[in-house]
Image (cartoon, rainbow, N blue to C red):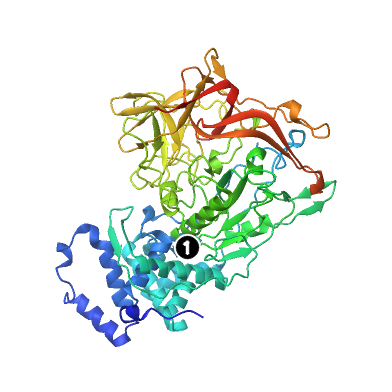
Amino acid sequence: MSRPFHPVALAPLRRRSRRTAGLAVLALAAGLLAAVPAEAAPADQRRQRDFAAAAQEFGVPESVLLGVSYLESRWDFNAGTPSTSAGYGPMHLTDLRAAGTGTHHDEGEEDPRGDDARRAKLPATPAPKPPPPGLQTIDEASALIGQDVATLRTDTTQNIRGGAALLAKYQRETGDWRAAVARYSGAKDAEGAQSFADEVFDTISKGVSRKTDDGQTVTLAATPVSPVREQAGTSKAECPKKLSCLSVPAPYQELPNNDYGNHDKADRPKSQKVEYIIIHDTEGYWDTAMDLVTDPTYVSWHYTIRSSDGQIAQHVPTKDVAWHAGNWYVNAKSVGIEHEGFAAKGTWYTEAMYRTSAKLVGYLARKYDIPLDRAHILGHDNVPGTIPSTIKGMHWDPGPYWDWAHYFDLMGAPLSGFGRPGSPLVTITPDFATNQPAFTGCETAGKPCPARGSGSVVLRSEPTDSAPLLKDIGLRPDGSAGTMAVSDIGSRAETGQRYVVAERRDGWTAIWYLGQKGWFRDARTTSPAFGLVVTPKPGLATVPVFGRAYPEAEAYPANVPVQQVVPLPYTFSAGQRYSVGDLLGSEYYSATTFDPANHVVVKGKTRYVQIQFGHRIAYVKADDVRILPAA
């Protein structure tokens, strides 16, 4: 049962009568409620006025309307593009006919169990299932306010009116604003819907103010409301107490021909330390993800988070190893979290999903003592290929439109503001809203993507805007330069990553990147950082770079096949420096049979240093490099 509002908030949050609302609309139309003429009000207040007017027109508490919109879109327009769950505009009105689907590339990643002798192509991802028809809220809103769906997708004023009309309708049918907000989430399960409502009212109680992606200043004043409910605690999922978490187990099951799926039993952190949390997107809708992760013949991951309401489902216990990252060394030492959505075609992620994901990652980081930085909280696009032949097929999700800066702010671990001015070590920190690289291929190969905020910084081979992009010999063995394709990460740095400055010239900065100097305009693009760097030891012209930190051959027991340590096709030369992410021992988790009694963790004497080498991390042997303070 939903709780009533805190008594202090009852008056402003009580729904107006139809007569009162009607009079308010007439007065507004006559200009009697406006303190100043609309044309005299600041241009950046238009969206605030739209929320106020829609709240008056439909009898919705303004704080509720603002709170719902913030949890869906942070009040942004997002260039009229759909969210990762097909929602449009500040009110996230869903239209599945206009929103598209996307796909990862599945070729080239290693066998999910990491055995070099059994490397194979991963199963192809089936076509995504669309969300259920009940989430098509744009049609319902269109009927309520008499505006066509195309207008609701592109006109923010009408989009807000449509969302307000829906909330008012849901309140009339449920008799309760919390229930109306829960229904607005579109969640099919009561726990997910209620969790969304709790987040909305928590936002209302705290208040928030920000400038939107199209320059509108919007404020939700803090309004006291009753505390959010405590979760019942009946779920078996490993999750923060105040979040709704479902248990949707992935099967550990024997298959024909001495095969099994779809993950491995383990005993982490007793057997191996969990070093990483890997952020993915599903390249499909929620129902598709649930079908795939419960298929014993497919791969697996630990958690999925739903876009519309932030609902979390756990599939694999965190002590066990899921098959999610395309790099067995990383799999064995990470937790994988999938987020409903698409890296390119659905180009923005909802605030509801960011919030619950940030809370989940914070919980896991505390549980496993994982640093909250971009050397340990990785995108799938930051996971290295294991050997030269797997580089090209590695995935690139969650893509350039994932807002890493906002995500880390939600975790209380901001990515900027550390280090002394002039430091040779910098953190990539572009302004997400105004940084809009001209990517192509979001919908059609070669065609421009919509102009959208991004955390990516494109690197050039010389300090001019017309210079070619860098070369990534792993992605393009022919030595050709990178492209602006949205999936091409070979000449791209990402928010939160740390690099060593190679040169500064006329407002441009060059960083060491894949053995080259990568140039970018440095106006508000980086923040000074402090930390450690590596460079080849004296006398070494180059040092090999690896995609996994496996032990030396002598460390393997006689019954465990030796996994070769094969260098990647890049050059780390004397004079170059790269940021240190961590110091690591060498490990290989041998888990190629269904019986966990046969699983073995092989630990060697070789030590590795994790570095930020390109867009992806890499490993070098500690014996090959000097570790120095950045300064």
x then y, percent, for residue 302: 63, 53
Q: Is residue 13 above or below residue 455?
A: below
Circle 1 residues within 10 Å: few <14, some 14–19, many ≥20: many
**Which residue is nearer to you in this view: 378 or 597?**
597
Q: Is residue 558 visible in this depiction of the protein? A: yes
Look at mark 1 in the image and give the residue it sits on: 95
Q: Is residue 627 above or below residue 315?
A: above
Q: Locate residue 581, reporting x and y percent.
A: 51, 35
Q: How many marks?
A: 1
SS of the residue at dot 1? loop
Could you tell me which residue is drawn at 30 percent across and 35 percent down? 523
Which residue is drawn at the image coordinates 43% and 44% (left, top)? 449
Q: Where is residue 367 in the image (x, y as percent from the top left)?
A: 57, 53
Q: Is residue 544 visible?
A: no
Q: Could you tell me residue 51's position as x and y percent?
A: 30, 68
> Is 343 above or below relative to 1?
above
Residue located farthest toward the right when viewing the structure as drawn: 257
Q: Which of 183 and 379 is in front in this view?
A: 379
- Which quadrant, please, contains the C terminus? top left
Is 31 displayed left or right of 276 in the figure?
A: left
Indicate left or right for 440 with 161 as reference: right
Give the residue at x 50% y 64%: 309
Amino acid type, label 1? Asp
Closer to us: 542 or 63: 542
> Which of the 4 image quarters holds residue 204?
bottom left
Q: Is residue 543 above or below residue 309?
A: above
